[in-house]
Image: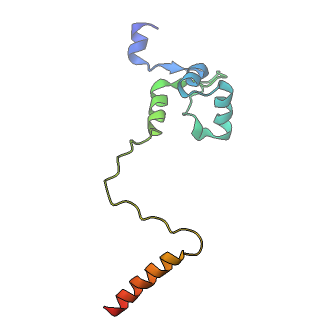
Amino acid sequence: MTAIQQQFFPPIIGIEGLSTLINKTPSTILADRCRAPHRVPPACTPTGSKQPLWVLEDVIAWLRSYREQQATPPAPSAPPPTPRRRGRPTKREQIERAAILAAGEGA
């Protein structure tokens, strides 16, 4: 490529280059263009060409649109309540619950 071409035209990649960038096989990329176009970046198919071409800037923008957001650490808070056990409460738990209810009614 000459200096003029590099200055005015964005880099173009073929199916092999795209395959390397998005880590998919060329056959998967071609199949996804028909069955699930959202899985591959938009392509250009010039007149008279049998193979699609991709503008590198478009591919990078497409990849950036799928970037995962950085997880922010949760604010420190009270520990979560312990979940209730399955099954019938133990005799001790029943007595403690009855004592709490009786204390609440007597107040």
Q: Quadrant of residue 79?
A: bottom left
92 lies above or below 24: below
Q: Residue at x 54, y 68 (%)?
A: 85
Q: Quadrant of residue 33?
A: top right
96 lies above or below 20: below
46 lies above or below 36: above
Q: Position of residue 76 (x, y in %)?
A: 31, 54
Closer to us: 48 or 1 = 1
Q: Position of residue 2 (x, y in %)?
A: 43, 7
Answer left or right for 9 relative to 48: left
**Colouring mode (rainbow / by chain / secondary structure / one colour):** rainbow
Q: Residue at x 51, y 69 (%)?
A: 84
Q: Quadrant of residue 42?
A: top right
Answer left or right for 80 relative to 91: left
Q: Give the quarter of the figure containing the C terminus.
A: bottom left
Q: Position of residue 24 (x, y in %)?
A: 61, 28
| Residue furthest top in the image | 2
Q: Residue at x 53, y 24 (%)?
A: 21
Q: Residue at x 53, y 78 (%)?
A: 91
| Residue furthest bottom in the image | 106
Q: Position of residue 69 (x, y in %)?
A: 41, 42
